[in-house]
């Protein structure tokens, strides 16, 4: 079975001030104690940012026809390759290809403010990083719940940029399968997404369990990230901003 791309709008995603601070690479507890003014700025960025985002996603569920070494041949001549995929999706009978974005309005506002008010612009940027991550996790959870309701298992989400699946390898594969220009997404020459506050991933579906693991284990920032195991992981493209 293969579905045509499905587009969903997600008007309600939940982001809090601590997420905004983490999105800036800060420790919320330390900021609250030492620089409370930045908490106030983060609160303002949260309020304005929620009015600027237009969360939307596009995904496609495709049957796996053949797996050979690191190459997955899917229905409708879709191909995926990568060491990371071979490690974690070997049991997959179907693969979900997914992209989502917050839209261009937030990014435009950040650019406008960067020279005038860089502190607030960075707070808005932190909000965008947090909101993009929440959006990706929300959709991933929704897909997992649907699969589990049918007695199926899902893999951990795998994102271009994780160890074993470079951005320049994974992003074009996902975009080729989805053609997400209809939701305003494109790739630049470095295979990074525009708008920046966007997420791409694949997810395996199978009738038997996948190998356990955490996305943080395969993030390029795993050795140095202060926030792994706190939900602040490689799911968002904004990891490239660190």
Image (cartoon, rainbow, N blue to C red):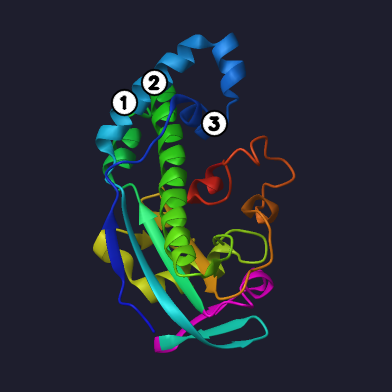
In the displayed structure, 210 sits above or below 68; it is above
Disc 2 to disc 3, how far (Cα)?
13 Å
In the displayed structure, 147 sits above or below 53; it is below
In the displayed structure, 120 sits above or below 11; it is above
Q: Earlier in the sequence, mark 1 or mark 3?
A: 3
Q: Position of residue 67 (x, y in %)?
A: 60, 86
Disc 1 to disc 3, how far (Cα)?
16 Å
Residue 191 appears in the figure: no
Local crowd at mark 3 within 10 Å, few (<14), some, or many (≥20)? some
Q: What's the mark number on residue 47? A: 1
Name the residue tied to disc 3. Answer: 22
Disc 2 to disc 1, how far (Cα)?
6 Å
Which residue does the image show at 52% across and 72% down from the upper left? 205
Name the residue tied to disc 2. Answer: 43
> Looking at the image, which is closer to me, 160 or 50?
50
Residue 166 appears in the figure: yes
In the displayed structure, 27 sits above or below 99; it is above
Asked if the residue under mark 1 is in contact with the one under mark 2, i.e. CB atoms within 8 Å, the reply is: yes
């Amino acid at each position: 079975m293969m579905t045509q791309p499905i587009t969903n709008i997600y008007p309600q995603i939940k982001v809090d001030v601590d997420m905004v601070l983490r999105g800036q690479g800060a420790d919320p507890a330390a900021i609250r104690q030492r620089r409370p003014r930045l908490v106030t700025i983060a609160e303002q960025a949260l309020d304005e940012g929620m009015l600027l985002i237009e969360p939307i996603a596009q995904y496609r569920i495709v049957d796996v026809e053949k797996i050979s070494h690191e190459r997955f041949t899917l229905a409708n001549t879709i191909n995926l390759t990568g060491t990371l995929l071979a490690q974690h999706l070997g049991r997959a009978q179907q693969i979900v290809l997914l992209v989502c974005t917050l839209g261009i309005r937030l990014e435009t506002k950040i650019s406008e403010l960067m020279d005038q008010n860089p502190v607030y612009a960075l707070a808005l940027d932190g909000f965008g990083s947090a909101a993009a991550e929440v959006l990706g996790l929300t959709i991933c959870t929704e897909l997992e719940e649907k699969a589990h309701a049918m007695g199926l298992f899902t893999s951990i989400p795998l994102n271009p940029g994780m160890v074993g699946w470079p951005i320049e390898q994974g992003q074009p594969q996902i975009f080729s399968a989805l053609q997400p220009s209809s939701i305003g997404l494109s790739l630049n020459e470095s295979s990074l997404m525009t708008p920046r506050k966007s997420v791409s991933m694949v997810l395996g579906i199978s009738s038997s369990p996948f190998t356990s693991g955490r996305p943080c284990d395969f993030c390029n920032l795993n050795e140095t990230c202060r926030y792994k195991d706190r939900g602040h992981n490689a799911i968002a493209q904004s990891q490239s901003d660190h």
